[in-house]
Image (cartoon, rainbow, N blue to C red):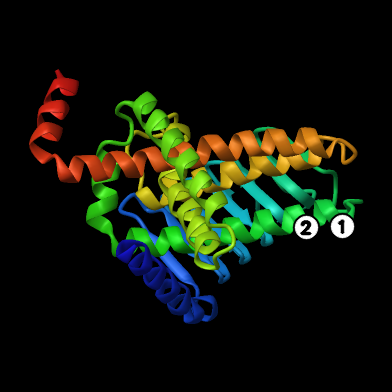
Amino acid sequence: MKKLTALLIVFILLMAAATPVFAEGIRVSSESGDRIQIFEDAEVTGPVQGNIIVVLGDVVVKDLVGGHVITVFGDSEIDAEVAGQVVTVFGKMTLRDGARIAKDVISIGSVERSGGAVIHGREVRILGEAMNLDIDAFLYLRLTLLVLFMLAVLLTGLLTILISKAKYSMISKNLEKNPGRKLVLGTLSFIGATSLLAILLLTLIAPILYIILLILSTIPACIYIGRMILKAFSQKNSIYIEFITGLITATLVKLIVLLIIPQQNILLATIVTGLINFIIYSFGMGILMELHYLRNNKPNAEKETQTTEK
């Protein structure tokens, strides 16, 4: 109980510490040249070797970008060469005359393209020219909760990775080992936590701790998803890039499920979304449980690591 109370206090402190972050924004850069900016606008006025990722902000590209340009909940304006893809999720994409996109252009939202803009890959527009969705109140509520949960995971994940570098370094080293064991451990943990919630549902602290547990378990699961995706492009990526890539992917999958399945079939949408969440939460809890085991059984863990490497 003391550990759970301490965890709750840490979470409250993180949320309190996030208040100035919303005003000043978050900036993260990697050795490979990747740039991540959250809660603020970005402007590229000089060559960038890696990827540009902007969440809840707008981006203007006026010089060469050697990687991808990804904007989530913001507008993007491209007036230079981009060696990778240009992706805009829930925002307006503007391609000026100087835009030279080497790969695909993907937009969930509207696209404005000047006559001189060149796209060497495919142009993919999801949900049409603009975000004019005819959704009912129930679907709107689910979309709102999905976005709020994503933001909570994003903020908590970035802060905890920054604060607990040693912990997530250990998670990163063992991330791809024994995925089956992680899933089994996580499934048992998730079922146990959910059962405990059902018993203590009338208490105030139980639902709060349960939500915190879901947020914390989503973080390592998103890192794993991001790594599996980015391995196709590069073997070494920043843990921040892996986390954000995995989180965006998981959120988009849930979003597509909500929007593709007819609104009349609420039960089917709930089952599919619930199954996706169950796998993510279970796998994330399994990663955390395995980390706890490795910390408490270091000699056995070292032997196991050596056996795995052989």
Around disc 2, counting alpha carbons within 10 Å, would you say few (fewer than 14), some (14 to 19), or many (20 or more)? few
Question: The residue under label 1 is which amino acid type?
Answer: Ala
Vertical comparison of 116 with 257: above or below: below
**Residue 137, numbered label:** 1
Image quarter of the C terminus:
top left
Q: Viewed as shown, does residue 179 lie left or right of 151?
A: left
Image-quadrant location for residue 301: top left
Question: The residue under label 2 is which amino acid type?
Answer: Leu
Q: Secondary structure at mark 2?
A: helix
Residue under the image location 40 percent in, 45 percent down: 220
Instruction: Please state the horizontal and vertical placement of residue 145, each as a whole percent of the image.
Output: 68, 57
* Disc 2 to disc 1, C-alpha distance: 6 Å
Provide the residue designation for mark 2.
141
Instruction: Please state the horizontal and vertical placement of residue 85, each as a whole percent of the image.
Output: 58, 41
Q: Depth check: give the residue in front, 91 or 213.
A: 213
Task: State whether residue 217 appears in this view.
Answer: yes
Task: State whether residue 93 appears in this view.
Answer: no
Residue under the image location 33 percent in, 68 percent down: 6
Q: Are marks 2 and 1 in contact (CB under 8 Å)?
A: yes
Which residue, as the protein is rendered here, is positioned at the far left? 299
Residue under the image location 42 percent in, 61 percent down: 158
Q: Viewed as shown, does residue 267 lie left or right of 252?
A: right
Residue under the image location 53 percent in, 34 percent down: 279
Image quarter of the N terminus:
bottom left
Q: Secondary structure at mark 1?
A: helix
**Residue 184, numbered label:** none
Q: Depth check: give the residue in front, 256 or 108.
A: 256
Q: Viewed as shown, does residue 155 lie left or right of 235?
A: right
Instruction: Please state the horizontal and vertical placement of residue 227, each as a whole percent of the image.
Output: 41, 37
Q: Viewed as shown, does residue 195 lie left or right of 101?
A: left
